[in-house]
Structures are given as structure tokens and as C-alpha cells.
Image (spheres, rainbow, N blue to C red):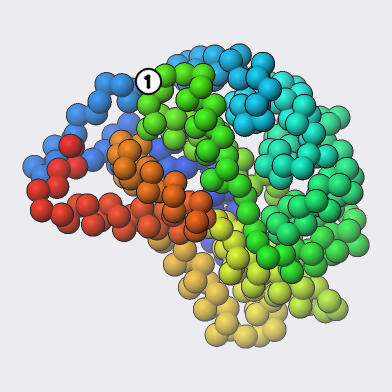
Amino acid sequence: MPADEGDTLADMPGAESVPAPGIGRQDAGRGTPTDSDGKDCVRDPELQIWATNEDRERIRREAIKTLAGSDDADYLMAAALFSKWDEAGTAYSLLEQLGGFDSDDPVVVWLMLGICEQRPGPQCDLSLFDQVALRRHRNNGSLWLASAANALQSGDDARAFQALRNAATAPEFDIYYDDQLRIVDLGLSAATSLPASQRLGEALAVISTHPYDLRGLVARCDEETDGEWPELCDQLGQQMASRGQDALTQRIGLRLQSHVARNRGDDAAVRDFEKQGQGIRERLESAGLATMDRLLRDEALQQEFLANLAVYGEAEALVRAVESIRRRNDAPGFDACD
């Protein structure tokens, strides 16, 4: 990716390395809601449970202990998500109980990919992923992108090209965002007494969004000017931008199309793709910390967000949350601190 094109993939909203605004870290004093006189709202003391990382780790350890002994698939997946950073061996074991890459459940496969990216281990046999998982879940372009990213990293151009061809005709690009939120919420409901707001905050902190590095793909589509690659990159970009359920997939799709257009000398198309990508970024930045803060304090807004997430995907659900908050703010007698 050329250095003068602005943000990197890690800067894009939704990247695996970037927590949701205000979630999973402390941002004291930023985005704090105020009342009509401009004074900071006084938060419910119960919402201060995440004041220290020690509190969070204790909750997670307790949840793992309670859920890992279950025979319920959702509970085991929740325990795996809580384990993935500090107890990767536990996470692998839990997901392998559910079949690992050989699972009929695509969410299990997705979580395996996420853990393999962060904590590679002997369980990360991506040949099994290619041979089994992709045949069972071939309609999800996001899984084909994972295969392509791995192939590009290992220098297997033929496998990468075929995976990208399959992604370019896939009917959906699903990162299982709503499934993971539901799973974590179920697990925390069973293992803790946390209120809904804190369960959502924890879920946003631990889910796997993009467990693969697509910078190699973006660079390849920028470098290739002859043969079949430009047409493939353009087709894939169109599919990702139109069918991606999350902001990062949509923006990478626009980035791929922009590279192809630039290589063809179509400056007008380049400007259009860049404008669309900037529009997505600006809409999500308008959500920002204040929106996430409201989501964590307003249970009705949470339920609306989760319902929209299941129907429209992450990017549109956040935009709709912003619009809903604006409507609430404009309602007569509204108090942001209530």
C-alpha cells in the first residue's frame, strides 16, 4: 500500500488490532456525556466495575472456569473467546471439542482463525481449513479471504488466486459479529451477574473481527497491472464493497477498486472510490466514543443496535445507532444523564 494513501489497514475501523472506541481500555474524560448545563453526567457506580484490568481479568477467569466444563457449544465458544489472549491452549482445546476447522459451525471455524492469527500453534493446520472448512462454508467470502491471505504470505500464488476468485463470487462477507456478541452475552449471563451494558462492553472487547492480514492482498492489487489480476481485484473489490457487512471489508473493497482504476489511469474513478471510502470512515467516526458510551448505558438503544446488527451488519448498525441517538437528543425534555 503506498505510504501516501493515508491510513493503514490497522487504522481502519473494525481492524482486529483496534478495539472499539472506549471498549477494552480506559478513556477517562473523553466522550463523557453532559447535561443541559454542560456538566459531566454522574455515572452509575455499577458501571465502574472495569476500573482496572484486574477486575476484567478476574471476571474472565471466573467465566472461563464456569463455562469450560459445559457441553453447550455457545458456552464453549464464549470460554474460548475469553481464553484466546492469555490461555491459547485452553482456547484451542475448547474449539477442538467442537470440531475445530472440521466443524459444521462456521463461527467455530472463524474463532479458530482468530486464535491461530494471534497465537499460532500446531492446531493451526490451514490445509485442513482449505480442504474441509471452505467446502462446507464456501458462500462466505470472508473465509476465502483468510485462505488467500495465508497463501500470499506463504508465496503460493496459485492457491491465493483461486481463493480470491471464489471470494469474488461469494454471496456474502460475514465476520459473524452478531453471532459472537450473542455468544459472549449468553456466556456472561450464565457465569456472572453483570448487567447487559457491561456484557456488551466485554463482548465488543473480545470478539474476533478480522483474523487475517490483507495488506498483502491490497499491495498485490496495486502492483499487478497485467494479466488476470487487475480484473480479479476489480471484481473482488466490487463484491466486498457491496456485500461486506462491516466497515473494514467495505473500505478494503473500495481500496482494491481504487488501485485498479489508478493503474488504468482513470483518475475520476479513483476520486470517487476514495470519496466513498472517506464517507464510510467519517460516518463511523461520527459514532465515536460518545455513541459507544450511550450504547453501554442505554439498554433500549443496545437492543436496537443488536437487532440492526443481525439484519444490516456492523457498519450500518453503528450508523443507525448514531441516528437514533440524534433523534433522542432532539426529543423534548431529553436528558443525556437520565
- Indicate the quadrant where residue 37 lies: top left
Label 1, secondary structure: give it.
loop
Residue drawn where x is 52% and y is 30% of the image: 186
Left or right: 139 as drawn, with respect to 277: right
Q: Residues within 10 Å of mark 1 (few under 14, many from 20)?
A: few
Q: The N terminus appears in which quarter of the rendering?
A: bottom right
Left or right: 190 as drawn, with respect to 326: right
Residue drawn where x is 50% and y is 32% of the image: 185
Single out the residue that lies furthest toward the front.
Answer: 71
Q: The C terminus appears in which quarter of the rendering?
A: top left
Please state which amino acid type lies under the numbered disc 1: Ile
Q: Is residue 144 above or below residue 48?
A: below
Residue drawn where x is 44% and y is 35% of the image: 200
> As rendered, which of 133 and 201 lies closer to the eye?
133
> As rendered, which of 206 and 214 lies closer to the eye?
206
Q: Position of residue 326 (x, y in %)?
A: 25, 56
Q: Position of residue 145 (x, y in %)?
A: 74, 56
- Indicate the quadrant where residue 317 lies: bottom left
Answer whether residue 86 is visible to the viewer in this image.
Answer: no
Residue drawn where x is 47% and y is 25% of the image: 189
Q: Position of residue 182 (x, y in %)?
A: 53, 38
Left or right: 61 as drawn, with respect to 286: right
Q: Is residue 326 above or below residue 278?
A: above
Q: Which residue bears the numbered disc 1?
A: 49
